Image (spheres, grey):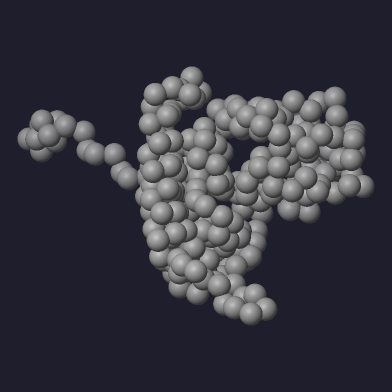
Amino acid sequence: MAEATRAAAGPAPAAAPTPILDVDGVTLQYKTKEHLITATYRVGFQVYPSDRFVLLGPSGCGKSTLLKGVAGYMKPVEGEMRLKGRGISEPGPDRVMVFQEFDQLLPWKTVRQNITFALINGGRCATGAEADDIARQYIRKVKLDRFEDTYPHMLSGGMKQRVAIARGMAMEPDVLLMDEPFAALDALTRRQMQEELLQLWEDTHFTVLFVTHSIEEACIVGSRILVLSPHPGQVKAELNAHHLGHEDVGGEPFSALQKRIHDMLFADRILEEEAAPHA
């Protein structure tokens, strides 16, 4: 009888997914020579496995500061950051950062050596042979097979960023942290790198927390987008971009999402200007 009742009621609802990263009411501050700056104020969001989660907002809204907090380089003065349920208190190989700058590679090591060095020193590999195998695997993924023995100064900016991404992914972190990684590239290379990042994600479904101030890039790269208000950064909105695919770039749904975000940020700019003292 009990079984019949359960059958009539239908299958049990699926359990809610567990976030891999939980940022809970976080306020972050840093000191300059003259001031104590509040970068973010009570920001909260959750990142789930395989998310392409984008932090988007104007300069000075605390996007990069939040990324540093998740990386373990800054501690909140209020709130908590948790990775897999554990409080973040220091950097670790479970969070790997890819920066905007091209000089993040070791200049005296080749492409392959830059990756094997991270694998061995980060504790993922115990032997050079194992590290070599993994490094070559990820070098192939970013299409740099012919350059594995090349030094960084012989690579273009886009190629250097491919190496940095390959190095980060080879570590298989819980979350790959990307701080405006394509901002310093020319427009064509930047668009190409966005597409390559999405293709890499299709292959492995890694979890990424991505910072940008470009609305277009957020809509291309992100599956979820957190829009932050101007300084100090607070959550303006969280938007779902799962419905957008590669083929939608430039299409009506893509343009509608861009316009929605633009209107949010533009409204903030107007309020800022109206609040500013006039000469």
Q: Nearer the viewer, residue 130 or 278?
A: 278
Task: List x then y, in percent, for residue 238.
Answer: 38, 47
**x, y percentage for residue 258?**
43, 35
> 125 or 213: which is nearer to us?
213
Number of disc labels: 0
| Above or below: residue 22 compared with residue 207 | below
Please state which of residues 247 and 139 is positioned toward the viewer in this rendering.
Answer: 247
From the viewer's perspective, tell me whether residue 81 is left or right of residue 128. Answer: left
Which residue shows up at 49% across the image and 63% down it? 231
Farthest residue toward the left? Answer: 1
* Quarter occupied by the N terminus: top left
Q: Residue furthest right?
A: 108
Q: Is residue 173 above or below residue 160?
A: below
Q: Residue at x 73, y 53 (%)?
A: 122
x and y, in percent, of residue 247 in the image? 48, 19
Does the image show residue 95? yes
Q: Is residue 218 left or right of residue 159?
A: left
Q: Is residue 118 visible?
A: no
Q: Residue at x 84, y 38 (%)?
A: 111
Instruction: Tell me which corner region of the image, top left, top right, bottom left or bottom right, holds residue 24.
Output: bottom left
